[in-house]
Image (cartoon, grey):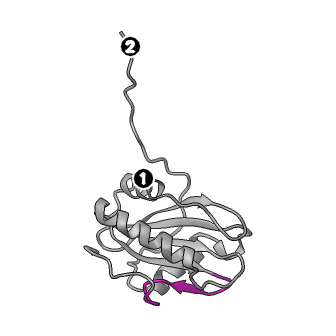
Amino acid sequence: MENISVVAVKQVRERTLPYNVRPIRQPEDAYSILCEAMALHEEAIEKFGVLLLDTKCNVNAIQIISAGTLDQTIVHPRSVFLAAVLANARQMILFHNHPSGDPKASRADVDITLRLIDASRIMGIPIIDHIIVGDGTFYSMRAHGDMPAPEGAA
């Protein structure tokens, strides 16, 4: 007879941040929260993460999914959606920084966003934007037409 493992998957809170709860209604709201909660514009390497939102578009969790090099990071849908499922997210906003300071979306940024949107349709957790943080400014892929309108967003 062999043994099988009985496992449990749990979300672990690493820390909490002060946050004046307010819904995200526009890209500037997401950027403001990222400025308050993270110092991405000061990072020397690229970091990719998610703002996980509840049904009222309030942030219920922030998670850095990956950290890379000066000009790239590897992002896999499995990691992105694991965070969303564990946080019981209704929808999410992707974000990452460009250490160069120029927040404009690259072809690779558009490609990974579209790949994650495909996965979001299967998972039922819409991606409502992808914010790229530069040096004191940001780029909203939704506002610039680099991604389709979300299906099923609240």
**Is 126 in front, or is 118?**
118
**Above or below 22: residue 85:** above
Q: Amino acid at mark 2?
A: Glu
> Residue at image x 64%, y 72%?
40
**Which stretch did the figure color magenta?**
134-145
- The residue at the far left in this view is 152
Q: Position of residue 82 (x, y in %)?
A: 42, 53
Residue where numbered disc 2 is placed: 2
Is the magenta region chiefly helix, strand or loop?
Answer: loop
Residue where numbered disc 1 is placed: 82
**Is 30 in front, or is 133?**
133
Q: Position of residue 42 (x, y in %)?
A: 71, 74
> Residue at image x 37%, y 27%?
6
Tell me, yes or no, whether the two marked residues, 1 and 2, touch with CB atoms within 8 Å: no
Query: Which quadrant of the view contains residue 21?
Result: bottom left
Mark 2 residue element: loop
Q: Earlier in the sequence, mark 1 or mark 2?
A: 2
Residue 56, numbered circle: none
Is 59 placed left or right of 126 in the picture?
right
Q: Amino acid at mark 1?
A: Leu
**Residues packed near mark 1 inside 10 Å, few (<14), some (14 to 19) or many (20 plus):** few
Mark pair 1, 2: CA separation: 29 Å
> Residue at image x 38%, y 13%?
2
Whether residue 147 is visible here, answered yes or no, is yes
